Image (cartoon, coloured by chain):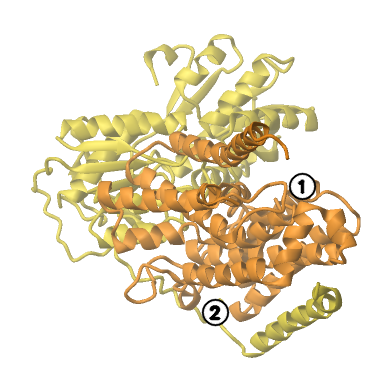
Amino acid sequence: MSPLRGALRWDTAVGVLLVAVFVTGLGTTDGFASRDNLAFAFNDIAEVALMALPMTLLVVAGQVDLSVASMLGLSSALTGQLWDSGWAFETIVPVVLLVGVAGGLLNGWLVTKVGLPSLAVTIGTLALYRGLASVVLGSNAITDFPETYAKWAVDTTTIPGTFITYPMALFIVLAVVAAVVLHATGLGRSLFAIGAQEDAAYFAGIRVKRIKLLLFVVTGLVSAFAGVVFTLRYGSARADNGSGFEMLVIASVLLGGIDFDGGKGTLFGAVAGVLLIGILKNLLTLNDVANEVQVIVTGLLLVASVLTPRLISTVSEWRHRRAAAATPSS
Amino acid sequence: MFLRTSSRRRAAASVAAACALAVTLAGCGGTTKKDSSSDNGGDVKATDAKANPDAPLKKGLKLAFLPKQINNPYEKIVDDAGIEAAGEFGGKGKEVGPSDASASSQVSYINTLIQQRQDAILIAANDPNAVCGPLKQAMKKDIKVVAYDSDTAKECRQLFINQASSEEIGRSQVQHIAEQLDYKGEIAILSATQNATNQNTWIEFMKDELKKPKYKNMKLVKTAYGDDDDQKSFQETQGLLKAYPNLKGIISPTTVGIAAAARYISDSSYKGKVVINGLGTPNQMRKYVKDGTVEQFSLWDPKKLGYLGSYAAAALASGQITGAEGEKFKAGKLGEYTIGKDGEVILGPPTVFDKDNIDDFDF
């Protein structure tokens, strides 16, 4: 790959854009740079950011999980219901995480053993898990969560001296783990191989089904955990918590330059994508930009993120061919 | 490739680890609902500031209206009237808000308003508790918080401007439809979202009213939820009429719901057979009142609600009142209001609109 094409890589571009937006914010928007605001802005996307990590791995492997936000809702509803019926919070969390694992297993089983496409399966479980959440909690909202735990999730508690909240700190740690797994291990290489050519990966001896199953389980687990974080952060467990987040998660991943067809992308891109969406939303809101316009901006960015890499490769291919035609074959 | 041999073992190990964790943690006893005190970060409402009823309204106050969702036509009217009222006392109002009415979406706006150092936030809460933390932060930074239309938990705001007493709204809707139906037949309710604070309170009062002996021949068969979404409300209406062929009336205590229900009925064979009543705006309902689909509906005047909210917020921000029971303040042309229990200020009784008076209103 030529240095020029390397510099034009979309994930790098998103990283640069993120820095540019951040600097613009510092320079133009009153209140943006305050510790409170930065803590809030980052904490506000904590759950989406957490779920974007396993989603990146899934999309790299050519899969997708649309049920993440519903699992978040189910986890939130279950946390609320169990808390309300007098369970200890320390018991609730592992139980809810196990439910996340079970949900992930169901997704993974339907994809790998039954052989259904992940998009179709998880559209189904998107409805299923959200439905179960409503069954668990109905129209109630449970709100009296213990301060001992809630304080770790809110944006007013930060690591002393910084604007990093604890959910964000957790995200940073998990992002490093995910980056190492994706880019520095055999498992990571297997994910790219599966995403690029599933059959070829299979014949190369990669345990395709097992890896996919594992990915769905991890995604379910992280989504359930995000549900606990969300519940504590808002202090409100409801069946409709996080509805629509699946689109934000997938948008972040795509914006970060992960190829929806699988096999291409970096974890850095996904992290830059999710932070860009968060910062942009915060900045536009601070400048009183109407919500409709914000949605349009996000939409345009997404289209650009899908279109630009295609354009770049088309142009360079065309250049390549012209160069090849110009030099007489030897 | 190393996965080939170890992935099964590893999967088993991780499940085992999770279980072990669960058991260990469960064994520790732990924090349950019973141990958690009611301490939720302290009550910031009771500020030590004394009310000075003679303080003049400050000039240049910045008021921000945060509706349930930005494209809700009803709340737009309230907010516009509030913004206009702010102009009367030399203040500056604006409306910001999310495009969906979910519980958490208002939170980022509250944070933004804190950063922008507004003098007061007027909020119609989507969830009484999800907005609590940020609103308490706002009050700590001396930003006044006034809830309107849909209340927050009462320790998270200084005042709640109630459009009318919930009891009066709930009961009067049953009374109205009962008169129209001659006190007999099956009725249904088409509400907003399942969690909408105000709708749920009204529905409780409707149910209570229906328990009275004079309604013994009336039966509430179903409460449907249209989520304050036009299309969903339309479909729910259709569903209700299909599921309950003997349905004689629908009460829709939400402007989106009643308009969608009336639109469905007006083009169907149910027109003239099924009574629609509830809360609607004259502009949205005019057509259906004129074509006979709807005989009457009611609502308070949302313009007055916004107007009162604006003046109440200004009175708070100027130190005339602190939100304590019994304090009085002047709300421009609406006259004097007294703060009731739990910081509630009641606007007044709802207005009934029918074909005789609907043309007197334009909102």
Say what amino acid the circle numbered 1 marks. Answer: Leu
Q: Is residue A318 above or below residue B56?
A: above
Q: Which mark is residue B269?
A: none
Check chain identity for marks 2 and 1: say if they share one.
Answer: no
Across and down, in percent, residue A57 comes to 68, 60
Q: Chain of mark 1?
A: A
Residue B148 or B218: which is nearer the viewer?
A: B148
Residue A68 or A11: which is nearer the viewer?
A: A11
Say what amino acid the circle numbered 2 marks. Answer: Lys
The Cα atoms of the two marked residues, 2 and 1, are separated by: 43 Å
Query: What's the residue at 77%, 59% (across, down)?
Result: A193
Left or right? Give the position of B4 relative to A75: right
Residue denoted by label 2: B34
Q: Is residue A230 above or below residue A11?
A: below
Across and down, in percent, residue B60 comes to 14, 40
Q: Chain A drawn in what color?
A: orange
Residue A280 or B82: which is nearer the viewer?
A: A280
- Determine if residue A243 is in view: no
**Where on the picture, by quarter, is residue A188?**
bottom right
Query: What's the residue at 63%, 25% (across, down)?
Result: B261
* Quadrant for the N terminus of chain B in the image: bottom right
**Where on the picture, by quarter, is residue B357?**
top left
Q: Which mark is residue A119?
A: 1
Question: Farthest residue toward the front?
Answer: A330
Helix, strand or loop status at disc 1: helix
Q: Chain B drawn in what color?
A: yellow
Across and down, in percent, residue A322 comes to 63, 32
Q: How many numbered tags mark residues here?
A: 2
Q: Chain of mark 2?
A: B
Q: Is residue B65 above or below residue B16?
A: above
